[in-house]
Image: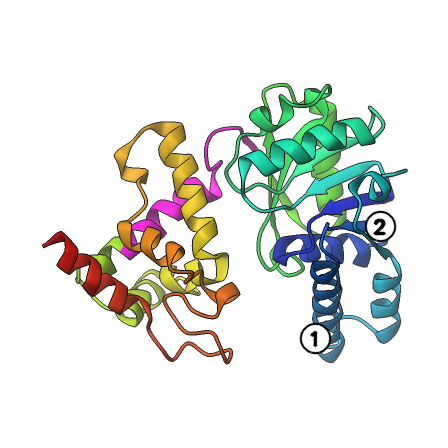
């Protein structure tokens, strides 16, 4: 297998494309937005420059990696002659179902269809295709070129052959694949998101401030990054979407998103991607704590 298509040129998509291309795969990077493709390719180039500066790769390695990537604004054109498609679009079930229905029409029946979804059921995604046995989850971690873990999620019908092949491909990318079954949030986000949500509730209820909460978790629990800073990196809109999947899937109120998280997303405070979340990221720093003001407003409304 040498020809791979990646759907979506955003943070995860360009990272996945970068990783496959660096390991010699021919990659079709697909996004309906030319601007998103341009930005995604610029990000890949910048990240490769960092690797060159650290002497992890050579200038020739960088050139080879970029030469392995071809961009497309049409899914139908981009998936011609590929053997694997990795979908990395926004965490929206309707969008993913539409993409997989299209992929089923535009690709040969032998092509494996993988999703980078962080919470949505692989079985549900596979249900809109005529090849559920060849649909699988391939959940990379951010930043993709750096993080070792890939959650490999088996849908109800995913075969052993497909699972073993995707596990092997992940190892060839110098990743550590972990096989999990198809339940809401899988493993990573079923454990991580309730922790992040509880950290947001701790802020919302006035127990402590943003930096205080993050400091407790970093210094007391040996986490490399506090949960609120991590939420900003993930994207508060993504955190909200995952919590909604967990809440809907399990029907347990412990997964209900904190009102503060909901209000921040509605207000456009989505973390690093928007420049503001629990911290200000406008100039690449975390000087301004934005959430405290939202928390105080919400507490007054509750009172």
- Which residue, given by chain and number where applicable, does mark 1 sit on? 50
Residue 47 placement (x, y as % from top left): 70, 70
Label 2, label 1: how far apart the Cα atoms are: 21 Å
Give coordinates of residue 155: x percent, y percent: 60, 25
Circle 2 crowding by C-alpha within 10 Å: few under 14, some 14–19, many from 20: many
Q: Is residue 237 above or below residue 177?
A: below
223 or 242: nearer the eye?
242
Within-10-Å neighbours for mark 1: few <14, some 14–19, many 20+: few
Instruction: Single out the residue that lies furthest toward the left.
Output: 303
Return the disc, 2 or 1, that comes first in the chain's sequence. 2
Q: Quick one: SS at disc 2?
A: loop
On the rendered structure, is 293 left or right of 63? left
Residue 249 appears in the picture as rendered = yes
Seen at 75% across and 27% down, the residue is 104
For the residue labelled by badge 1, is the local secondary structure a helix, a strand or a loop?
Answer: helix
Q: Is residue 205 left or right of residue 218?
A: left
Where is the C terminus found, in terms of image quarters?
bottom left
201 lies left or right of 164: left
Residue lying at 69% horizontally and 59% vertically, measured from the top left: 36
Observer able to see residue 226? no
State the predominant SS element of the stretch in magenta: helix
The range drawn in magenta is: 180-200
Horizontal side of 266 relative to 68 (left or right) equals left
Q: Position of residue 280 (x, y in %)?
A: 41, 74
The stretch drawn in magenta includes residue 35: no
Mark 2 — residue?
25
Residue closer to the observer: 262 or 205: 262
User: Residue drawn 46% across and 32% down?
Assistant: 184
> Are circles 2 and 1 on residues that touch, CB within 8 Å?
no
């Amino acid at each position: 297998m040498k020809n791979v298509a990646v759907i979506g040129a955003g943070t995860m998509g360009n990272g996945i494309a970068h990783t496959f291309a660096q390991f010699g795969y021919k990659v079709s990077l697909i996004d309906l937005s030319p601007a998103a493709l341009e930005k995604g390719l610029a990000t890949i180039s910048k990240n490769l420059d960092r690797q060159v500066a650290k002497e992890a790769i050579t200038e020739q390695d960088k050139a080879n990696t970029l030469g392995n990537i071809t961009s497309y604004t049409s899914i139908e054109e981009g998936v011609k002659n590929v053997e694997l498609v990795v979908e990395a679009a926004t965490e929206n079930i309707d969008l993913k179902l539409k993409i997989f229905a299209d992929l089923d029409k535009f690709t040969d029946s032998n092509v494996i269809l993988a999703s980078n979804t962080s919470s949505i059921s692989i079985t549900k995604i596979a249900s809109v295709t005529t090849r559920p046995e060849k649909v699988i989850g391939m959940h990379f971690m951010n930043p993709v070129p750096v993080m070792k873990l890939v959650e490999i999620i088996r849908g109800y019908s995913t075969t052993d052959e497909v699972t073993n092949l995707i596990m092997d491909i992940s190892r060839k990318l110098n990743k550590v694949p972990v096989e999990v079954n198809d339940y809401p949030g899988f493993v990573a986000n079923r454990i991580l998101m309730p922790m992040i949500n509880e950290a947001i509730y701790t802020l919302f209820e006035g127990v402590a401030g943003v930096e205080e909460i993050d400091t407790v978790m970093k210094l007391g629990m040996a986490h490399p990054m506090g949960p609120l800073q991590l939420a900003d990196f993930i994207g508060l809109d993504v955190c909200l979407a995952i919590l909604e999947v967990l809440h809907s899937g399990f029907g347990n109120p412990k997964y209900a998103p904190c009102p503060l998280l909901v209000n921040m997303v509605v207000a456009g405070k989505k973390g690093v991607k928007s420049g503001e979340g629990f911290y200000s990221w406008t100039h690449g720093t975390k000087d301004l704590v934005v959430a405290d003001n939202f928390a105080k407003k919400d507490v007054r409304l509750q009172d």
